[in-house]
Image (spheres, rainbow, N blue to C red):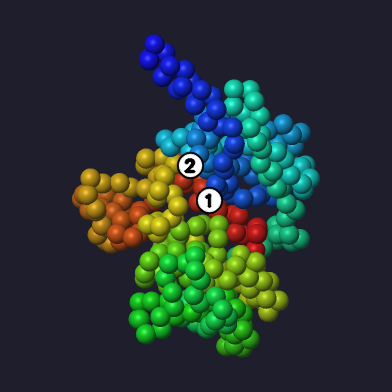
Amino acid sequence: MKKIIILQLFLFLAFNSFAQLNVQHVEPPNWWVGMKSTSLQIMIHGENIAFVDAKIRDKDVLLKSVKRGDSPNYIFLDVEIAPDAKPGSFKIRFFDGGKNIGSLEYQLLQRAEGSALREGFSQKDAIYLLMPDRFSNGNPANDNLPEMHEKVNRADHDGRHGGDLQGVMNHLDYIKETGFTALWMNPVFENNQEKYSYHGYSITDFYKVDARFGSNEDFKKLVTACHQKEIKVIKDMIFNHIGSNHWWMDDLPFKDWVHQFPEYTQSNYRASVVVDPYVSKHDKTKMLTGWFDRTMPDLNQNNPYLANYLIQNSIWWIEYA
């Protein structure tokens, strides 16, 4: 009798575990119509979402497949967007045992005018490289924020000094008048680490500008201001590693999302091994898969879902800004 009661309780919990949809991340957060490639992979992160069914019923969007990660909290939706699709939105509906338990509205935006005619940087350009945190503090109000672990400490050589996007905007005339035609900033993504994150290479969110620099909208304003002065903007994209506080690290989509070892293994930083035909396999493996630092896990781009994520993230920022 006890076994029957326990089994009934288990079945009750199983069938009632999705009474409320709990989605925490949808990435990319939106996309655009009129893209050269009509394929898109949407990563959805939510509690036990791998156990529900996702469906899309839209004349302009075809759901080709639903793939699940090693973690039960991820699904990857492969969709095809019609070449003639109009801007708007479509619904991603979720079902548990045939019962609709919720839905997400996914936006498809119009591309910016002239987006297909963008010109990249070349040997004709003079590029100004700057580190936002160390350049100019245009908005002291964002120096110390309660949600960010590291606060400003100008007395610490390795600490945050308060520079931001507004500081860069305030000095665009200087950059232009000095003769530069392109601006390259260190990464401006969120780096919500406990310490030593001013450089921008310990990313904790690929779709969010670090709040101590400003907002996503501030970045877009900076790009617009640069273009008005005929200054190109080069965005520093980081594909080798992330910060140890990235939300992925609490729940990796796949076991091989980052390179893992029985014990901490650091890169040997011997970049020459990549092109050396006589390199030892040990040296090459350590260079390519070892962590940059204890707080900077090494991403495994051989995972096709991660590789696609990084490519789409780059495209998203180009279209967004």
Find numbered disc 2 in the image and state the secondary structure of the residue it sits on.
helix
- Disc 2 and disc 1: Cα gap in Å? 10 Å
Q: Which residue is mark 1?
A: 311
Considering depth in this image, is 61 or 161 the residue closer to the camera?
A: 161
- Can you give x and y, in whole percent of width and height, for residue 44 in the image? 55, 42
Dot in front, 2 or 1: 2
Direction from residue 80 to residue 113 in the image, left or right? right
Find numbered disc 1 in the image and state the secondary structure of the residue it sits on.
helix
Q: Quadrant of the C terminus?
A: bottom right
Quadrant for residue 199, please give it.
Answer: bottom left
Name which residue lies at 55% across and 28% down.
16
Position of residue 16 relative to residue 243, above or below, is: above
Position of residue 72 relative to residue 293, above or below, is: above
Q: Quadrant of the N terminus?
A: top left
Name which residue lies at 47% across and 67% down.
148
Q: Which residue is mark 2?
A: 305
Direction from residue 236 to residue 268 in the image, left or right? left
Quadrant for residue 245, please give it.
Answer: bottom left
Considering depth in this image, is 213 or 240 the residue closer to the camera?
A: 213
State whether residue 124 appears in this view. Answer: no
- First along the sequence among labels 2 and 1: 2
The amino acid type found where label 2 is placed reads Tyr
Residue count near mark 2 (Cα–Cα under 10 Å), binned few <14, some 14–19, many ≥20: some
- Can you give x and y, in whole percent of width and height, for residue 260 in the image? 30, 46
The amino acid type found where label 1 is placed reads Ile
Name which residue lies at 76% across and 33% down.
59
